[in-house]
Amino acid sequence: MLVQLPVHPELLRLAAFLSIFIVLAILEQAWPRRPLTVSKPQRWLINLAIVTTNTLLVRLVFPLAPFAVAALAQANGWGLFHLLHLSGVLAIMAGLLMLDLLIYTQHRLFHRIPLFWRIHRMHHTDLDLDVSSGTRFHPFEIMLSLAIKLAAVVLLGVSPLAVLLFEIILNATSMFNHANLRLPLTMDAWLRLFVVTPDMHRVHHSVNPRETNSNFGFNLPWWDRLFGTYRAQPGAGHDRMLIGLQEWRDLRHLGLWPLLRLPFIHPPLRRTP
């Protein structure tokens, strides 16, 4: 049975994105975790220009969004879940878990494989972390990730509702765990049992390669614990840790055009632990 929504899925995603972005921007302004080292307007201009570019390119390159592809797969009975006759809440939960595991695995590969690292390292060049950092991904990475996701949706037969929920959750958690938001330590300890928190993900943006190659999860923290990539805290502490990449700290090389050219310049450094 196809899902009928009162509002177009893309409008729901946009409304959720803008609402969560605004709320987190206000919260991190009120309770910042770290002092910023770079002009926020300068960084936001670049990061928001990147997300705008990505949105326009995706609309041009992929005429069918993941929700539409999932609806097509459902209508034709494609995918593993349909063969197993999974339906209802069980199918939704299975779809959310499998897509999240896919994102975790993809993230690890983007750090491990030099060609993919060339594309992904743009995300790690941000010298500060805040809610806008959750949108800072190279267009090549966005399109490659979307192609992988579309293939997974068809092969697994993920339901349209599960795909829509995952897209909204992924956007929300990406902005949340990049936010420069101070949470009480007790709250952080409880939250990171179920979701990746800002303090947990910040370790992943350390200049220390051993810390960069940890805490790959975006939504669920379980995969890092299960596969041995979990690191509770940065060695230097959150207040003193250096964020970004050691080889890209000059702001002249971190403008929009240099970042878009990043996959084509300089040999990628090995990011093995």
Image (cartoon, helix red, strand yellow):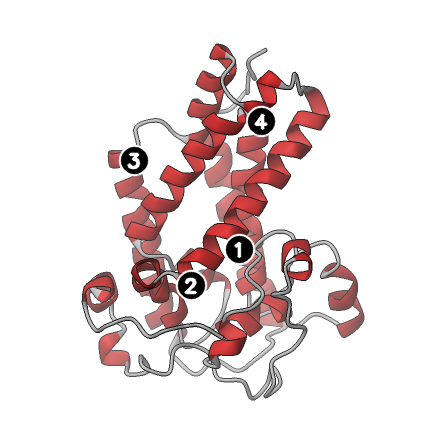
Reading the image, the residue beneath label 4 is 161
Reading the image, the residue beneath label 2 is 111
Q: Nearer the viewer, mark 2 or mark 3?
A: 2
Residue 133, compared with residue 81, is above or below; it is: below
Q: Is residue 106 left or right of residue 113?
A: right
- Badge 4 vs badge 1, beta-carbon distance below 8 Å: no
Q: Earlier in the sequence, mark 3 or mark 1?
A: 3
Secondary element type, mark 2: helix
Reading the image, the residue beneath label 3 is 59
Residue type of the residue flagged with mark 3: Arg
> Would residue 19 be seen by someone viewing this image from the given angle?
no
Q: Nearer the viewer, mark 1 or mark 2?
A: 2
Reading the image, the residue beneath label 1 is 174
The picture places residue 95, in percent across and down from the top left corner, at 60, 33
Dot 2 surroundings within 10 Å: few (below 14), some, or many (20 or more)?
Answer: many
Q: Nearer the viewer, mark 2 or mark 4?
A: 2
